[in-house]
């Protein structure tokens, strides 16, 4: 059965492609109000969705800009007083425009790659959460961020990918810390770090050759699985790092 639509809008960042776009389509299809954010939503597949869904609002935001998260939050506040769900999908693993790619050895590491990865993968969701807290704390709500199993310190047996691994590990710690505070300040707020598995998106495209076919998931399938976890989430789970099945992952 399709769950009833959420009482307040869903905010999805990184909504112009990959998992973010699939989550946007899924939430719209089930009747949710969606605020979809990306750098340039009007020139993305999101623009076509606005013609079919009057429950979709597009907001342009560059979350790598120091003022980007706060600016997005201010724009969201002009559309709604409350949010039922925030899903941070914006993230970076590689970017040819910035000569950013996963490091294979220590000599490949640079301050620029570390800073940019941390800015989008770890700092942006927390700065966004800081600005949106008043809209999340007064009623049951969920704040989720797409993390990655490679961010697990315990599970790191291969090394490499310094910037991506460490920024996702930082995201996990920030989410966990926020969850501890939220138990006091916003007890009906649930915080989740989500591992989607290897998904067929532009982010993973250069690294799919060694992924078995059965372990490479479509974005639509992943969106469905993650939404099941979000629909079932309770404050007792807040601060968890889980995969698309709901299995807890090692920190």
Image (tube, helix red, strand yellow):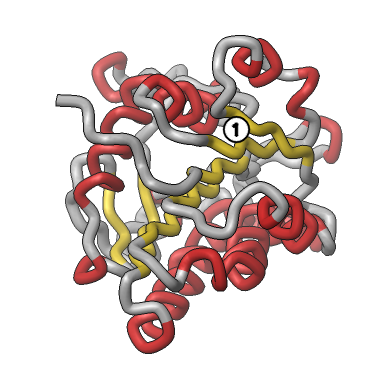
Identify the residue shown where x is 44% and y is 51%. 85
Task: Indicate the position of residue 152 as horizontal and vertical percent values.
Answer: 38, 60
Tell me the quarter of the picture where residue 154 sits. bottom left
Residue 126 % position (x, y): 59, 67
Question: Splitting the image into 4 quarters, where does residue 16 fall?
Answer: top right
Please name whichever residue, 109 or 89, is drawn nearer the observer in this view of the structure.
89
Q: Quadrant of the C terminus?
A: bottom left
Residue in view at x 63 percent, y 55 percent = 163
Tally the numbered discs.
1
Examine the rendering and report whether any part of residue 167 can be seen: yes
User: Residue lying furthest bottom in this view?
Assistant: 184
Of helix, strand and loop, which one carries label 1?
loop
Q: Is residue 237 left or right of residue 70?
A: left
Q: Residues within 10 Å of mark 1 (few under 14, many from 20)?
A: many
Identify the residue at image location x=40%, y=78%.
186
In this orientation, which residue lies closer to the viewer: 194 or 190? 190
Q: Residue at x 44, y 58 (%)?
A: 143
Residue 23: x %, y % from top left: 45, 30
Residue 166: x and y, percent? 55, 62
């Amino acid at each position: 059965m399709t769950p009833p639509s959420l009482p307040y809008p869903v905010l999805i960042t990184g909504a112009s492609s990959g998992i973010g776009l699939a989550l946007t389509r899924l939430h719209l299809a089930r009747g949710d109000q969606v605020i979809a954010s990306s750098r340039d939503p009007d020139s993305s597949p999101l623009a076509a969705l606005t013609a079919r869904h009057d429950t979709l609002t597009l907001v342009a935001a560059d979350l790598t800009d120091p003022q980007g998260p706060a600016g997005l939050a201010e724009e969201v506040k002009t559309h709604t007083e409350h949010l039922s769900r925030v899903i941070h999908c914006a993230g970076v693993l590689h970017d040819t425009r910035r000569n950013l790619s996963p490091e294979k050895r220590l000599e490949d590491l640079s301050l620029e790659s570390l800073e940019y990865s941390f800015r989008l993968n770890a700092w942006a969701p927390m700065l966004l959460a800081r600005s949106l807290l008043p809209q999340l704390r007064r009623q049951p709500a969920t704040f989720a961020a797409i993390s990655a199993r490679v961010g697990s310190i315990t599970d790191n047996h291969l090394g490499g990918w310094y910037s991506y691994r460490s920024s996702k590990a930082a995201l996990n710690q920030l989410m966990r810390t926020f969850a501890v505070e939220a138990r006091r300040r916003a007890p009906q707020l649930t915080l989740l770090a989500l591992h989607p598995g290897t998904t067929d998106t532009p982010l993973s495209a250069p690294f799919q050759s060694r992924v078995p076919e059965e372990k490479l998931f479509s974005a639509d399938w992943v969106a469905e699985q993650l939404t099941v976890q979000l629909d079932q989430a309770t404050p007792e789970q807040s601060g968890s790092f889980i995969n698309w099945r709901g299995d807890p992952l090692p920190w």
